Amino acid sequence: MTQNADSRGKSQEIEVFVVIKEGADRYYLLKVERRNYDVYCFLPDLGIHHSLHESGESHFKHEEKTCELGEEPPVALIMGEAGTPIKNGIKSISISGLGRSAGICTAIFSITSLNKDFRKFNRKPRECFVIDKNFVSECVAGIEVGVWAVPSRNKISFEWNHRNIPAELLYKVDSCETQIWIYAQHV
């Protein structure tokens, strides 16, 4: 995590990597960045990312640098909350002053062949959510990773929507307001 903030709400930057561990190897699934009240969800080698801006605009954006066609990771990326269609996306919610928890985006990953489908992750970042594949049943072929905005005054609104998530499958960045929570569960 990179964080620069003070109590008056100056610049906040947070970076969390989400990886899945199988044996001694880690595989890169997702990176979540928060820049003030903008949140970005990047998936390596997909060629697209999801953004939720302070204005409430939510959209997918193509990236210049992509992998070869057909080499994309096996993932479905789903926008968070519904809203009003606008020119380049959806007008939804802003995480600034949010009173309830809100979904930012969800990614569903096929995990049947991690070493073939995902890039190995060898970094040692400050903030890293490591999902141990052993916590997911052997018969499960996929996992859902959700990114949510959770206000500290209303954590129950997240917990109501996501019951029974084990502590080892929930990662909380509570050093900022609104907090960013990332969960994993099998699908």
Image (tube, rainbow, N blue to C red):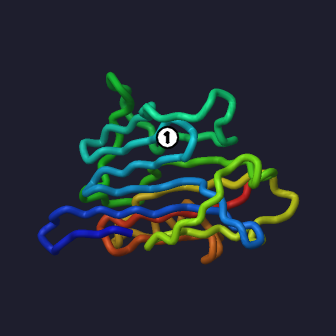
* Pick the front one: 184 or 155: 184
Q: Which residue is mark 1?
A: 79
Residue 64 picture location, percent across and down? 43, 31
**Considering only vertical position in the picture, is 97 above or below 49?**
below
Q: Secondary structure at mark 1?
A: strand
Name the side, left or right, on which 88 lies relative to 156.
left
* Pick the front one: 50 or 103: 50
Q: Residue furthest left?
A: 8
Residue 51 picture location, percent across and down? 39, 43
Residue 139 picture location, percent across and down? 87, 58
| Residue at point 35%, 63% (across, down) | 14
Residue 55 picture location, percent across and down? 24, 42
Name the side, left or right, on which 153 lies relative to 184.
left
Q: Residue furthest right?
A: 139
Q: Residue furthest top?
A: 87
Say what amino acid the circle numbered 1 marks: Met
| Residue at point 73%, 72% (across, down) | 24
